[in-house]
Amino acid sequence: MSHRVYLADRPQHFDVAEGETLLAAGLRHGFALPFGCQSGGCGSCRVRLVSGAIDYPFPPPALSQAERDAGYILMCLARATSDLTIALHQPPQIDSLRPRQLPVRAAKKEWLAHDVLGLTLKLPKGDGFQYLPGQYIDLLLDDGRRRSFSVANRPNGETLELHVRVTPNGRFANWAANEMPERAILRLEGPLGAFYLREDSSRPIVMVAGGTGIAPIHAMLDELLSGGLPRSVHLFWGVRGERDLYLDARLRGWAAAHPQFRYTPVLSDADAAWRGARGLVHEAVLAAYPVLSGHEAYLSGPPVMVRAGKEAFVRAGLDADHLYYDSFDYAFETWPQLG
Ligand SMILES: Cc1cc2nc3c(=O)[nH]c(=O)nc-3n(C[C@H](O)[C@H](O)[C@H](O)COP(=O)(O)OP(=O)(O)OC[C@H]3O[C@@H](n4cnc5c(N)ncnc54)[C@H](O)[C@@H]3O)c2cc1C
Ligand code: FES
């Protein structure tokens, strides 16, 4: 038996077949719905269930209990068991940003840190590829596998900058660092994900990045600062040691130039000379903001950091409606389900 899905914030609906996920049905009907891994791991397809009932094949891994209690569901896993209303909370421009595939040329690579490669990709001339600062793309590898990377620059119509962490066995990252020919042509799909600035809010923002999770946040900050920074932003960047703070000088420069912007680097493995914050990055946030009600939070980076942060922040009073995150799951976890 099919069911009908109504959108709370638009005068539109679509039908979902028996056993079909909400995401598959919405995409089949041509809706620009947010998604990433399609396997319950990343949280990109999180929406609020306003009315009706769903079930899951297994508990939704990306959602904390607090998010489930607040009515959030994952469209990539949820099946309708009645007619439903869901609230997408998407800006109107997202409708014109449907993911598509395109070729790009590797224009530049440079080491940003000892294990982070900066990769600049040139977009085809006149292609008009657009995205919102904070979104990511998937690079499509030769054997059909894909690797997700956030775009680190705000849109300029010409290039996409990626911050690629090079791990010992990382297949794409090591190929890009050591074997990729100059001016190589790569294929990507994007823009993807629901991690972008909500500009309809005036709440003070807390941003939390772990490692290369600074990439999408850098794009957002660049966009916010270019608009004169309409509200206060406090960025916490967690890394292991000082050598990992590869954007430190730029972020300190921004903080010096913009009184509304604060920047706190947090080292989990600092040496004795370090004078700044130490420990886990979400704990440094809570030390500065024991009560987070009234704030808006953006988190990106390793899954363990995102999970710990979002649970702790909601416990500290953050409204789950104002919590946005991009969990940098490794491809090997998500690939088998992508098929
Ligand atoms: C939405 C999204 C956005 C992302 N954005 C970025 C980004 O901007 N920059 C970035 O560097 N990564 C990002 N990632 C993570 C990245 O897609 C994965 O780490 C990917 O697996 C890297 O591909 P690879 O071929 O280099 O390594 P793989 O061949 O996939 O991995 C090989 C081995 O290395 C390990 N490994 C891979 N990545 C990491 C890591 N980061 N930390 C620890 N161990 C690891 C894996 O466990 C695996 O055993 C993002 C992921 C998602 C889902
Ligand atoms: S697309 Fe649903 S959790 Fe990743």
Image (cartoon, rainbow, N blue to C red):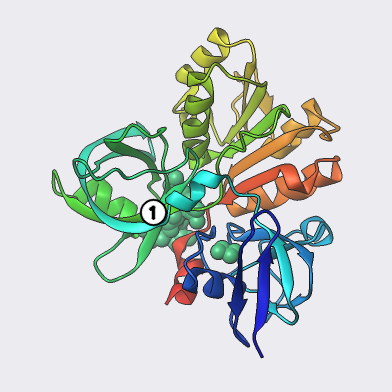
Q: Position of residue 125 (x, y in %)?
A: 18, 41
Residue lying furthest front? 11
Q: On the rendered structure, is 238 left or right of 100? A: right
Q: Give the image quarter of residue 232.
A: top right
Confirm whether residue 138 shows in the render.
no
Residue occupying the point 64% across, 86% down: 2
Residue occupying the point 29% across, 43% down: 128
Q: Position of residue 142 (x, y in %)?
A: 24, 66
The amino acid beneath tag 1 is: Gly
Residue occupying the point 69% across, 69% down: 60
> Which corner quadrant of the figure contains ligand 1?
bottom left
Confirm whether residue 32 shows in the render.
yes
316 above or below 143? Answer: above
Q: On the rendered structure, is 293 left or right of 283? A: right
Q: Position of residue 157 (x, y in %)?
A: 30, 35
For label 1, the residue is 190
- Asked whether 153 or 197 is in front, the reply is 197
Viewport quadrant of the N terminus: bottom right
265 above or below 41? Answer: above
Q: Position of residue 337 (x, y in %)?
A: 49, 75
How many marks are shown on the rendered structure?
1
Label 1 Cα crowd, 10 Å radius (few <14 / some 14-19 / many 20+) = many
Q: Please, what secondary structure does the residue beneath circle 1 have?
A: strand
Residue occupying the point 13% across, 44% down: 182
